[in-house]
Image (tube, grey):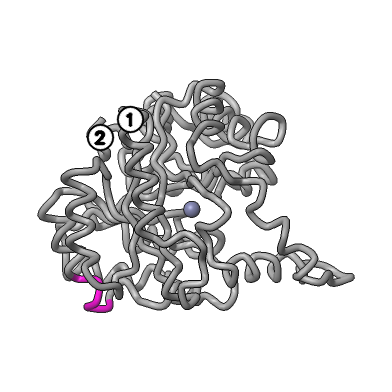
Amino acid sequence: MIIDMHIHVWDEGYQPIGYKMGMAKGAAFKKMPFKDPLDILPKIMSGASDPDGILLIQEMNKFDIDAVVAMVVDMGLAFNQQQDTPIEAVIEQHAKLIAEYPNRFFAFFGMDPRRKNHVALFEDAIINKGFSGLKLYPPCGFAPDDPVCFDYYEKCIELDVPVLFHTANTFPPLDPGLSHPSHLSAVSSLFPDLKVIYGHVGRPYWWQDILHIAESNPNAYLELSGWNHVAAKNPKKFANILREMVDTVGAHRIFMGSDFAAGPKTVGDRNRLPAWLDYLKNLPINAEEYNVQFTDEEIELIMGENAKRMIKL
Ligand SMILES: [Zn+2]
């Protein structure tokens, strides 16, 4: 069974213009000669829109992906609500897809904890709309161990659903420091029964900090999206990193994820998801050449069996 634990469904209006500008700046100043971010801006995300999930389901069928878990991200407050589609409408669209594609499309609710009424809406989404968990994006301006988040955690425990935190780097002016795993160490101390998923496992440089915290916490889980880029560039390096993750927390606590967002420019030949799936599936054979061993059972857990348990499929 293959379940992608971290994908996105976007439409043009889902992300604030300020966030897209941050992505454009990130791309513009990566190497010399520098480019004008304004020239790059129109290209950002325009090719990854598929609000009705049509291209997504096509790609899932093509690559034998049984199910996906879409993450709703709420960046509205961080950018003074400069987005065309309000977060309530984004959540409704995800609810529609859950209903339309039963057992194939799953989603995690996402709303900034500083909004009003967020816990009631979250509870309604889980109980009545089929959502499977909560996604939080701390770089938007709150730390995971800030008491403003605690009502959410109590509700997650009560409803027995996990919370996935973004723990990777991000784009300016958002604050990646708020994603540092030390905040999550505090959360797990205060709420030991809370199932915490480390989204992106601290890519690129905080993965060892996460292992340090997650090793002794049975409710800590790792979700691998973003590491597909590392595996593509340096398959040996990532095989070693994954082995260390498995040895530290156990293969039963790691999920395959991709951050894939279907759209006219990300499907077909441009889709990098199949290469990621092939890489992981073939690790028991291919990693031998790097002197790293994986069993078929470990890979099956990571590819989907763990996610199946978590989303109660
Ligand atoms: Zn994501």
Magenta part, dominant SS: helix
Q: Which residue is mark 1?
A: 305
Q: Residues within 10 Å of mark 2 (few under 14, many from 20)?
A: few
Q: Image point 54% across, 45% down: which residue?
A: 240
Q: Residue at x 24, y 43 (%)?
A: 129
Compared to residue 209, the image places residue 3 above or below, namely above
Nearest the camera: 244 or 29? 29
Mark 2 secondary-structure assignment: helix
**The residue positioned farthest toward the left in the image shown:** 158
Mark number displayed over residue 194 = none
Seen from the viewer's position, the closer of residues 232 and 29 is 29
Q: Which residue is mark 2?
A: 309
In space, the residues marked 2 and 1 are separated at their CA atoms by: 6 Å
Residue occupying image coordinates x 41% and y 65%: 137
- Image quarter where the C terminus lies is top left
Q: Which residues are magenta?
A: 146-150
Classify residue 110 as left or right of residue 309: right
Which is more toward the observer, 70 or 213?
A: 70
Amino acid of disc 2: Arg
Name the spot of residue 110 as percent of width and height, x first: 34, 58
Position of residue 103 relative to residue 307, above or below, is above
Callout 1 crowding tier (Cα within 10 Å): few <14, some 14–19, many ≥20:
many
Determine if the magenta segment contains residue 164. Answer: no
Residue reaching furthest right? 33
Q: Please tell me whether mark 1 sits on a helix, a strand or a loop.
A: helix
Q: Is mark 1 within 8 Å of ligand 1?
A: no
Quadrant placement of the N terminus: top left
Q: In the displayed structure, does residue 72 sit left or right of residue 259?
A: left
Name which quarter of the figure residue 188 lies in: bottom left
**Type of residue at label 1?**
Glu
* Image location of residue 52, percent across then percent down: 48, 38
Q: Are marks 2 and 1 in contact (CB under 8 Å)?
A: yes
